[in-house]
Amino acid sequence: MSDRLLVSTRKGLFVFAAKSDAWEIERHAFLGENVTLALADARDGHWYAVLNLGHFGVKLHRSADLGRNWTEIAVPAYAEGDTCATGDGKPPAPAKLQLLWSLACGGAGEPGRLWAGTIPGGLFRSDDRGDSWQLVRALWDRPERSQWFGGGYDAPGIHSICVDPRDARVLRVAISCGGVWHSADSGASWNVTTRGMFAAYMPPERREDPAIQDPHRLVQCAHAPDHLWVQHHNGVFRSVDGGRQWHEVADVPPSVFGFAVAVHPRDPATAWFVPALKDECRVPVDGRLVVARTRDGGASFELLRDGLPSHAYDLVYRHGLAVDDSGDRLAFGSTTGGLWTSPDQGERWRASQTRLPPVHAVAFARAAA
């Protein structure tokens, strides 16, 4: 069971330790700096923290001692001549790292391997714990990339990376806006897998165009990795065959709009969402903060609100909701600095007594295997 919670915020990384049913701050790092993402690698115990320092650019740090000390390491970089199109008719511009939007560990038999997704839509691989990075050109050079465009950002970006625990050569990535892509050979070749998805924001003739779908977040069940969930811009979609076919999950209460999704690590039919009203008004429906849970693959939902505020206007980002490897503990953080944890799959929620800066991401951490 995870015993640390890493909370990435606009003004630092906060490390919470489990104390019975409560979580208390154990330490913090990068105080005052914009930490956008953190990753705990259970294979060797290393932690990674991504910083976005504006004028000073994107930085990546690594810790080998549970966040007590950090070392700056390399960040993914584009080569001279690499260009990025934004899908809006503008001419391609030089590709430059704007955001390191996702980090994922390689397989159990791939020590040191990491994957990183970036804005403007590049996937990078490291085989030395982030000391160096290589652009996965097989995806970058796909002709469809010229059709990708930004969702909330001006340029497209890779925000979700799923590595199949049965076979680490199998990768799936989700792109806003560029669909879901699959590789069976460690990134040497790719195919788009969005059949069944639709984009309600596009003209009818492009509604099912795979290259312009906007998945907000992609997650896979750890013990049944062919079972995938996507919180899409205009709905929720589920696949039970590794993404070959997607099925819309209709009538998610109180709204199908949102950014975050988490799936139980052993039960692929159980998933959680934090809905918002709509794209044009990113607040909870009726000002009531709730978590929607399904236990039957989306056939029905429960609204979990015990311990959550009845008057709130919090938004939860893509990486702001997490479930630990027990499947029982949940946590989510909001854009207004709220942090809530649950010990029982969301039945009861407890608010942190610490008033945090805006939360970008939460991640559970456990001791190395």
Image (cartoon, grey):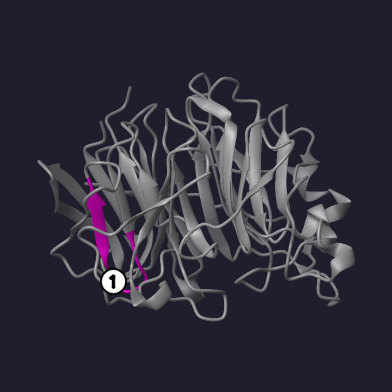
41 drawn magenta: no
Residue 1 occupies quadrant? top left
Q: Nearer the viewer, residue 189 or 74?
A: 189
**The residue tagged with tag 1: helix, strand or loop?**
loop
**Number of numbered labels in the structure image:** 1
Direction from residue 344 to residue 265 in the image, left or right: right
> Could one spot residue 158 in this view of the protein?
yes
Crowding at label 1, few (<14), some or many (≥20) Cα neighbours within 10 Å?
many
334 drawn magenta: yes
Q: Is residue 8 above or below residue 326?
A: below
Which residue is identified by label 1? 357
Query: Could you tell me residue 339's position as x and y percent?
Result: 26, 61
Q: Residue at x 66, y 32 (%)?
A: 242
Quarter of the picture containing the C terminus is: top left
> Could one spot residue 49 in this view of the protein?
no
Q: Seen from this angle, which residue lies furthest left? A: 20
Q: Seen from this angle, which residue lies furthest bottom? A: 280
Residue 304 occupies quadrant? bottom left
Q: Residue at x 17, y 53 (%)?
A: 27
Q: Is residue 85 above or below residue 250?
A: below
Q: Residue at x 30, y 76 (%)?
A: 312
Write the start and end of the magenta stretch as one range. 333-342
Instruction: Name the amino acid, label 1.
Output: Pro
Query: Could you tell me residue 80's position as x and y percent?
Result: 76, 59
Query: Could you tell me residue 29's position as x and y percent?
Result: 25, 57
Query: Could you tell me residue 56's position as x and y percent?
Result: 48, 71
Direction from residue 150 to residue 308 in the image, left or right: left
Q: Nearer the viewer, residue 148 or 76?
A: 148
